[in-house]
Amino acid sequence: MQLNYFNQPYFGNGDIEKISKVLTLNGIKKPLICSDPGLSSIGMTDKIINLISDDFSSSFYGETPANPTEKSVNDALKIFNNNGCDGVVGFGGGSSIDLAKAVALMANHGGNIIDYSVVEGGYRKIAETIPMIAIPTTAGTGSEVSDGALLVMHDGRKLIFASPHLRPNAAICDPELTIGLPPFLTAGAGMDALTHCIEAILSPIIDPPAEAVGLDGIEKIIKQEGLIRAYKDGNDKEARWNMMMASTEGAMAFSKGLGAVHSMSHAAGANQELNLHHGTLNAVILPTILKFNHNHVGNKYSRIASSMGINKSANLADEITKLNEIIGIPNGLAEMGITEDMIPELVKHSITDPSNITTPRLPTEKEWENLFLEAM
């Protein structure tokens, strides 16, 4: 099945076998495959390499960190240039796909990667990149259909890169690639997708189609129990299909923008020593922001509750907290290694995050501090 949205991702069980066809359609003969050590250790990268026809000459970068860095982009770019590659494949979670986007960007753009970040006015500087294909192996970020990427710079900042030109030329969404994903990764990735759907809906930007897509994603995750079922049984094919679709829908929905949950998780995720999982951070922070935004979003909470299959007057923050407990999400930021002495720096990062542009209620500096304390 193909979706008629953005760049028409291939979506279906077994669609990974179309990789050679997709490379050909996008004019790629010498792809650089960007992946991570975890996938290599379980033989997943061997699978994709073996599926690519001998008509192609593939190169490989398998050291993508949990939060892709400026250094990892430069390392992968060297392999791309040294081997005369003409396209990039991001194979893995959002980190591998974001890194692949950055390599595709820098392969034909001059200067330094930081020049193209949103805070440096990069949106207007980014032109057409070299061809890039995304193949997600987790169901959470939706990076395969989004026009953004997150990278940690040499100076420690976790910055957003955004442009329609960063949207992959093609995506292969094969739910079977997520079969057997460990429960803790299933949980964190799934909560990332849920946060995307919720924050997109709460964004004040008016875009009814994107909002409807987000509500459908929430229904698949919660009402149809896609997340809980996939967490409890990694081999549940229907649950995996629903979560992969919800992940893709979450990214489609956040064309409306995101909000303060992501501003805070970007700040905490920039700490390279802790190397915290983005989706898990979103899960921990989400209840705090739901409380903060209450009474500032009209009737949107009741609409979200309906999509979740719960009473329209239910307390969403409490419902998310209960869900977090069921799927083993940490009880707070402190449990993830964040300490109170880090909060001033986290606040600085949060204040400047571009996700604030579409948050329904913009915190003051003191409110940012209190929000981090509450999320501890």
Image (spheres, rainbow, N blue to C red):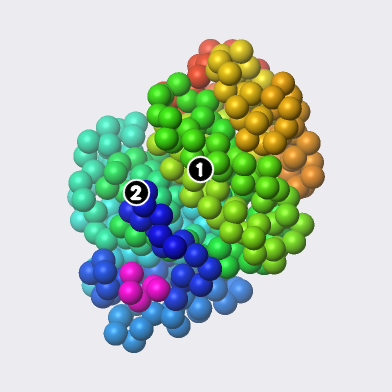
Local secondary structure at mark 1: helix
Q: Which mark is residue 250?
A: 1
- Tell me the SS state at disc 2: loop
> Callout 2, which amino acid?
Phe
Which label number is shown at residue 66? none
Q: Residue 256, how many percent across, how many down? A: 42, 31
Rounded to the nearest whole Å, what is the CA distance between mark 1 and mark 2?
Answer: 13 Å
Instruction: Name which quarter of the figure residue 300 lies in.
Output: top right
Q: Is residue 220 magenta?
A: no
Pick the residue in front: 270 or 266: 266
| Residue 21 drawn in magenta | yes
The C terminus is located in which quarter? top right
Q: How far across and down, in percent of the image, does residue 167 sit?
A: 33, 50
Q: Amino acid at mark 1?
A: Gly
Residue drawn 27% across the image and 32% down it:
121
Graded by Cα atoms within 10 Å as few (under 14), some (14 to 19) or many (20 or more), the crowding at tag 2 reads: some
Question: Residue 220 placed where, x, y %?
Answer: 62, 46
Viewed as shown, does residue 362 lie left or right of 279?
A: left
Q: Which residues are magenta?
A: 18-22
Q: Residue at x 40, y 73 (%)?
A: 18
Q: In the image, 233: left or right of 363?
A: right
Task: Write down the residue under mark 2.
Answer: 6
Residue at 30% over, 41% down: 163
Q: Nearer the viewer, residue 1 or 82?
A: 1
